[in-house]
Image (spheres, rainbow, N blue to C red):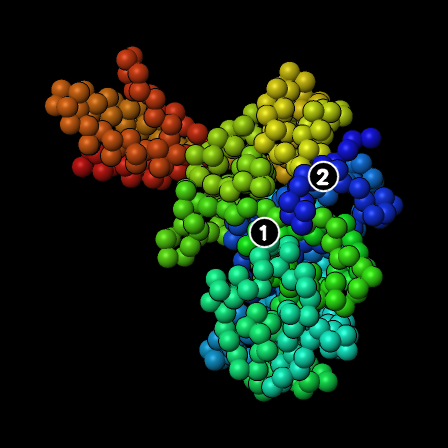
Amino acid sequence: MVQIRLTNTRTRKKEDFIPLDASNVRLYLCGPTVYDRAHLGNARPVLVFDVLVRLLHHIHGADAVTYVRNFTDVDDKINAEAQRRKAAGAPGTLEDLIAERTQETIAWYHADMDALGALRPDHEPRATAYIAQMIAMIDNLIARGNAYAADGHVLFDVRSYPDYGQLSGRSVDDMIAGARVEVAPFKRDPMDFVLWKPSTDDLPGWDSPWGRGRPGWHIECSAMSAALLGPSFDIHGGGIDLQFPHHENEVAQSCCAHPDGQFANVWLHNEMLQVEGKKMSKSLGNFFTVRDLLDHRIAGEVIRYVLLSTHYRKPMDWTQAKADEARDIIWQWRLLTKGVEPGQPHPDVVDAIANDLNTPGAIAVLHRLKDDPATLLASARFIGLLQAGDDGWMQADYQALDNQADQPDFDQILAGLQEKLADIRTQAMASKDFSELDRVKAALTDAGLEVRMSKAGVELVMRPTTIQKQVVQIAQGLTS
Ligand SMILES: [Zn+2]
């Protein structure tokens, strides 16, 4: 049997993965806060876990794996969006508007992750359905002396748990020294974190022994994982940005509430995603959602390929160049495997994934399988690529090409452009001023044309992504 090895953040070692119970391998992934569309960075842990789950299915059988990913539907951002809608005159109570917002966001999330070929988890608990379990867990933590009520809040007492900081490798004193922590007067220690907080009348709230209020974020994953997977389970994952404080706090709560359990045996953290070498941010204008990419006709399996082409423990850089390259590769693989029955995944692909989810290694093997389409297909499907029914984007692109071909003028326009570009190039070489040539070339590339320049001349090549309208505009700009 294939031996899985995973880098365990808890022990900081790459270890053989031994399930606690091979007949029920249990995983938990921190899911989205459902107030808006998932951005591209949110997709990364989902795809990492999807590859892991597919591997576990392959080795243990799908029935022997339980995969849980939560929906955080209690959150200040959700409340703020609902309040904004109410202020704008939307009908219904605030609770109705919150439910409406979270339901629509969950539907978007499902559609977007489905488009990336991610399998749905076995359980997708919503935090609001587990408030009673959270209250019981908080109660238990108070009874055990790990939490205290103060000023309508309940706080976890970090000094009561000597291992606090072990997952992220920090001591409480270092954290206090290094962090800008909010020091509320009712906290015994600045690092104590909220388990429960009071709700004002205009916010959602639940009755509790500490008054009407709502849970803190961290407690929900502890309560839901315990309810669905038990006090000890195999693998817990999420982005590295969640390691502290979210995961550290989950460990503290869960281990104190269930001293006989060990919570997650293996912690898996993926590195962050950047865009064109920069941190994704709304102010830089390089922030986009999975849906933005899909709407720009970048197919889900193309996005998947790009994300899997970097190992999960390395920072990932999304670039348009990678997306273009991935598109051409997938296109080629789809043509090679058209009408082919899948064989068995290549053992090297399985081995690569078993070796700490080495997805770039697996992709490198796929590139060597072009002469064996049946194995290529099965191996690609092993990591969720080339799945049946996911080739709709190719049909759409063929159609776009056909539509463009139907327009008799377009070939002529293209030929004219090619001539014009050759002239500009001749002038540029004579004057040694290449600025106009560069400008036109960039505009044509941006419109999805491939610009080939050689000694023989200039050639403009249509690609599936060519935007005809834009090309026509460029041609008009050059002749006017
Ligand atoms: Zn979580």
- In the image, what residue occupies the spot 30% across and 36% down? 443
Quarter of the rendering containing residue 164:
bottom right
Pinpoint residue 86: horizontal percent, then vertical percent: 51, 79
Q: CA–CA distance between discs 1 and 2? A: 20 Å
User: Alpha-carbon neighbours of circle 1 within 10 Å: few (<14), some, or many (≥20)?
Assistant: many
x 81%, y 44%: residue: 19
Label 2 sits on residue = 15
Nearest to the observer: residue 313 or residue 291: 313
Against 207, residue 268 (above or below) is above
Q: Amino acid at mark 1?
A: Gly
Residue extending farthest top: 456
Q: Position of residue 149 (x, y in %)?
A: 66, 82
Check disc 2 and give the amino acid type: Glu
SS at badge 2 = strand
Q: Position of residue 368 (x, y in %)?
A: 61, 19
Q: Residue 112 bears which disc, if any? A: none
